[in-house]
Image (tube, rainbow, N blue to C red):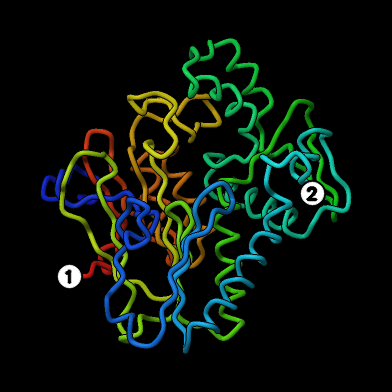
Amino acid sequence: MSKRLKHQPSFNRRKFLGLTAAAAALGAGYYFGIDPLLDRGYTLKHSKPMMGTIVNFTIIGPDKESCHIALQKTAAHMDQYGQAINHYDPTSQLSLLNGHGFIENGHPTLIKVTRMSLEMSQLTGGAFDPTVLPLLALYKNVRQGGALPDQKIIEDALSHVDYKSVIIDGTTIRFAKPGMGMTLDGLGKGHIVDEGVRFINALGFSSVCIEAGGDLKVTGTKRSGQPWTIAIRNPRPGQTEEQIFLKMENIAIATSGDYMQAFTPDRRYHHIINPRTGFSSPELASCSILAPSVAKADGLATSAMVMGPEKSIALLDTLPDCEGFLIGKDLSTYSSKDFFKYNEKN
């Protein structure tokens, strides 16, 4: 086994992960490594509730007015672009698909993100599965203080989980089994961030950072000409371990963790569920993935939480454009072969 997959005491309890989810300067209670030199010229920082989370924009431009106009246009585009894949909205196409088992004349976003999700399922051997919605529904009451579902109920829900039973035929999507349901949250939010970055770049703003719930992409550089600096921190509250800072240009990063949407106080049960067992995997506390797109980073981070460290690192080492940093529940750390080339200290 590679040394990178063994416990690494030099990092344990000192240099940790948990990708920061918002700019500290925005008062959201997170840490975000933005260099003060950004203030040369005009830098717009703005937070907006979208997609069930807070989306944070950092835009570098020539003046205040142009930055605000770009922000408004980009946010509106992201809102409209993502409406079809919002399963919390009962009128969205994804909700209609879940309700009826099929939909015709699917919105391009729904078709595209569904295809991307199924490709991620194939890449990860089913560790990523967008059809886990029936399982997630079982745990909804747990978060509200209810009892854990028993094994029989979980087994029944598992019979409706199968990404291979999602059929796309042109603009029609249908489920091959009754009782199925799909969530595209696993990489859909990331794809909308990617689309927002693409849109604002097309408006002429080449240096931007858009972040949503811990998933972000940067393009260009800071006003100083230096790469963006992004902090990765300890996911466990109440601890003060040293952060890792990464230098990033034209790249995305996403983090999945057992602490983000925990169903139980001990974080044993959380929103990332193994689609084969119906339970959260027991090995990892957090996974941070670097990739060319937020969608890919998001999907791989979710998958890594299910796959565990050995399989995840083995997969990442076959993907030349992706790197990862993982931490176990026992506080051991794992990294892909070139992750630390992004370390600010290098």
How far apart in space, not on screen, are marks 2 and 1 (Cα)?
Answer: 47 Å
**Residue at image point 56% right, 51% down:** 187
Mark nearer the N terminus (2 vs 1): 2
Image: 55 above or below 204: above
Residue 318's x, y, as percent? 43, 58
The structure residue drawn at horizontal position 53% and vertical position 24%, both measured from the top left corner, is 278
- Where is residue 130 shown, x and y percent of the image? 62, 41
Element under disc 2: strand
> Which is more foreground, mark 2 or mark 1?
1
Q: Which residue bears the numbered disc 2?
A: 168
* Residue positioned 70% across, 33% down in the render: 181
> Do tag 2 and tag 1 residues touch (Cβ < 8 Å)?
no
Q: Count all numbered tags in the image, as a single digit.
A: 2
Q: Is residue 11 left or right of residue 27?
A: left
Q: What residue type is labelled 1?
A: Lys
> Mark 1 = which residue?
345
Whether 296 is drawn above or below 131: the answer is below
Q: Could you tell me residue 35's position as x and y percent?
A: 28, 74
Quadrant for the N terminus, please: top left
Q: In which quarter of the image is the C terminus?
A: bottom left
The quadrant holding residue 256 is: top left
Mark 2 residue type: Ile
